[in-house]
Amino acid sequence: MSERGPRGGGFESYSSWRERQERPPQNLREEVERMYMEVPTELGREILGKILEMMSAKDRAKKLAAYVATADPKDITTYFPEKKLGILLVCDATSPKTYHVGDTVIERGDRILQVHIPPRLAPAGQNNPLLADLTESLQLTSDYIKYQGLRPKYITGCTYEPLVRIAERRYGFGAVRVNIPTEWSERVERVFHRYVDPDRKPVIGFIYATTKEFQARFPARSLK
């Protein structure tokens, strides 16, 4: 049986919420929450709501960074929605929209497993350690799917050339390089400019494979 990590916080009891409302705000978040509850206009509520969303996103990013820095990259026995496996960050998610990629249609609501390839330079030769790291990380991903009983319909990712070409030719992913949705391409472009080359516009591609195709290439190993 696998250990499932927390998917998110539980609901706060009414008594603890009431107690928080009756004492002075202890930090900026509580102050903004109080303002959100008391603001008299819809516009004010919308603005404060967006501020709270940004604060929550920042907190999640900090927690994720701390997890990535300390997690065992070979542990497949513990589940997290965002999981470090080798050099990859693997996200158990659903497709937020319907996407047409090549001859494949990923429907809104389809279970997908997103693999985020790290911002590293492309291999210069067959002995470059990135190839070995990617191979082992993709194998760990297949092991993780089997161990956790996950049922994604597709394995997907978005990265820049020449990593797209490597994923396509070496690892059997399908790839598209045109009309990449901005919710995928903008993040990859920011990572490329920050870690690889701040002055060059990257060629970005979306990679995908059905889980059946992926696991045929990377048969899951039994946990010993």
Image (cartoon, rainbow, N blue to C red):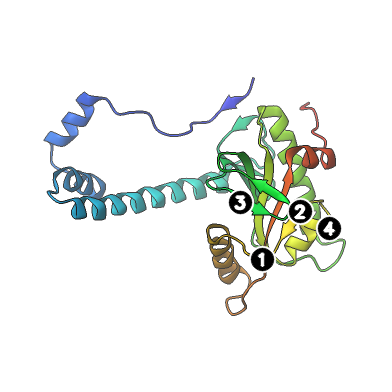
On residue 169, which mark appears?
A: 4
Q: In the visual, does 22 lie left or right of 12?
A: left
| Foreground tag (4 vs 2) | 2
On residue 178, which mark appears?
A: 1
Alpha carbons under labels 1 and 3: distance apart? 13 Å
Neighbourhood count class around disc 3 (C-alpha, 10 Å): few under 14, some 14–19, many 20 upward: some
Alpha carbons under labels 4 and 3: distance apart? 23 Å
Alpha carbons under labels 2 and 1: distance apart? 13 Å
Q: Position of residue 47 (x, y in %)?
A: 25, 55
Number of marks drawn: 4
Q: Position of residue 224 (x, y in %)?
A: 78, 26
Mark 4, secondary structure of its residue: helix
Give the amino acid at mark 1: Val
- The residue pinned by badge 3 equals 99
Neighbourhood count class around disc 1 (C-alpha, 10 Å): few under 14, some 14–19, many 20 upward: few
Alpha carbons under labels 1 and 4: distance apart? 18 Å
Q: Which of 222 and 202 lies nearest the eye of the viewer? A: 202
Neighbourhood count class around disc 2 (C-alpha, 10 Å): few under 14, some 14–19, many 20 upward: many
Give the amino acid at mark 4: Arg
Mark before the other along the chain sequence, 1 or 3? 3
Give the amino acid at mark 2: Gly
Q: Position of residue 75 (x, y in %)?
A: 67, 35
On residue 174, which mark appears?
A: 2
Neighbourhood count class around disc 4 (C-alpha, 10 Å): few under 14, some 14–19, many 20 upward: few
Mark 2, secondary structure of its residue: strand
